[in-house]
Amino acid sequence: MNPGDVNLQQLLEQAQLMQQQLVSAQQELNDAQIEGSSGGGLVTAVVNGSGELLELKIDPSVIDAGDAQDTADTIADLVIAAVRDAVRAAADLQQEKLGPLAQGLGGGPGLGQLPGF
């Protein structure tokens, strides 16, 4: 074997290991529940690690029966802020779980040395 030759068996094993790690990380993200909130906890949004909205809670104290329009506008703003907070936290979790795997594809020994990887 020449020094420049690629060890295909070793490369295949590395690719299979990375695939297993990726599947495991994706499952962890799907199972994760991340909470975001706004208004000091008046509105809480729960998303999974992929950013899919699972639950939304609105504290009844936000509702002002005397001013329906203002209440609706306030709730809408709080919901948007809570969902954004939860999705941002989910993106952070995605980076934590998937970031090292993506770096493995682009750098270091193994797949990163092959064109297209």
Image: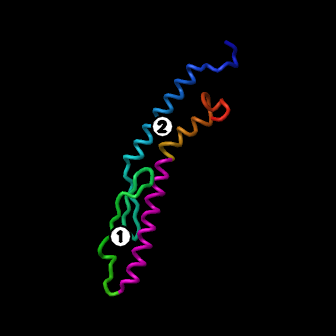
| Crowd around label 2: few <14 · some 14–19 · many ≥20 (10 Å) | some
| SS assignment at label 2 | helix
> Magenta-highlighted stretch: main secondary structure?
helix
Expressed as whole percent of the image width and height from the top left, the position of residue 32 reads 38, 48
| SS assignment at label 1 | loop
| Range of magenta residues | 67-94
**Where is 114 relative to 29, above or below?**
above
Q: Residue at x 38, y 69 (%)?
A: 40
1 or 2: mark nearer the eye: 2
Q: Is residue 90 magenta?
A: yes
Q: Residue at x 30, y 76 (%)?
A: 61
Q: Residue at x 64, y 21 (%)?
A: 6
Expressed as whole percent of the image width and height from the top left, the position of residue 111 reads 60, 30
| Horizontal side of residue 110 vs 49, given as left or right | right
**Where is 54 relative to 58, above or below?**
above
Q: Quadrant of the N terminus?
A: top right
**Where is 111 relative to 67, above or below?**
above
Expressed as whole percent of the image width and height from the top left, the position of residue 29 reads 42, 46
Label 1 belongs to which residue? Answer: 42
Q: Residue at x 43, y 63 (%)?
A: 83
**Farthest top residue?**
1
Q: Is residue 12 magenta?
A: no
| Crowd around label 1: few <14 · some 14–19 · many ≥20 (10 Å) | some
Expressed as whole percent of the image width and height from the top left, the position of residue 19 reads 49, 33
Q: Are marks 1 and 2 in contact (CB under 8 Å)?
A: no
Label 2 belongs to which residue? Answer: 22
Please state which amino acid type lies under the numbered disc 2. Answer: Leu
Measure the C-alpha gap from mark 1 to mark 2: 36 Å
Residue 61: give its label: none
Q: Quadrant of residue 2?
A: top right
| Horizontal side of residue 104 vs 64, given as left or right | right
Please state which amino acid type lies under the numbered disc 1. Answer: Leu
